[in-house]
Image (cartoon, rainbow, N blue to C red):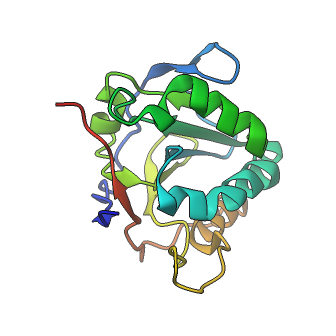
Amino acid sequence: MARTASNMMALGTVAPNFTLIDVISGNKVSLQSGKIATLIMFICNHCPFVKHIQQQLVALGQDYVSKGVNVIAINANDAENYPDDAPDKMKSTAEELGYNFPYLYDETQEVAKAYQAACTPDFYIFDQKLRCVYRGQLDDSRPGSELPVTGQDIRAALDALLAGKPVNEAQKPSLGCNIKWKN
């Protein structure tokens, strides 16, 4: 389990556009700003860091989609060498966990590169104008840390946007497995 930190995209960066297939619906999904914010999560199926927080990812979708936050999960791992991250397995995981947000497959890995994603999980929050206001960790919990998974860092950023307040710029990098890049 390689521990890789996120690259921390510069605050203010405009979200790179994309169109990817949602493995749940089979539809193409393009980047659109949410009414309040857009949360983009680079995740996968097999990473122990992602498995550790899966229930909180579901809770984020349940708590924020109805409030005008566009929530999108993207898997950019090389499914050929990591078959647990193949689209059919992604769909099974999303259905089993009850994702109420799209789970997109970035087969070419171009979207992950455009976002400078480095690990799973890697989180980005963009404001209504799709400018990066948060990048980093879900919270301080890690597998084996004994800390509860609360999502407090992401929730604080989203709650600030919902309240019309600035997001605290003191942000910690996410930590997880490296994205499984193709050779």
Q: Residue furthest left?
A: 183
The x and y percentages for residue 67 are: 80, 48
Residue appearing at x 61%, y 62% in the figure: 53
Quarter of the rendering containing residue 161: bottom right
Q: Residue furthest top?
A: 27
Quadrant of image for the C terminus: top left
Q: Nearer the viewer, residue 11 or 81?
A: 81
The x and y percentages for residue 118 are: 30, 51
Quadrant of image for the N terminus: bottom left
The x and y percentages for residue 42 are: 46, 45
Residue 101 visible in this rendered orientation of the protein? no
Q: Nearer the viewer, residue 12 or 17?
A: 17
**Residue 38, above or below 169:** above
Q: Residue furthest bottom?
A: 146
Instruction: Count how many numbered circles sit on residues in the image.
Output: 0
Q: Nearer the viewer, residue 85 or 105?
A: 85
* 43 lies left or right of 96: left
Residue 159 visible in this rendered orientation of the protein? yes
**Residue 72, above or below 124:** above
The x and y percentages for residue 147 are: 60, 85
Residue appearing at x 38%, y 23% in the figure: 107
Residue appearing at x 23%, y 31% in the figure: 182
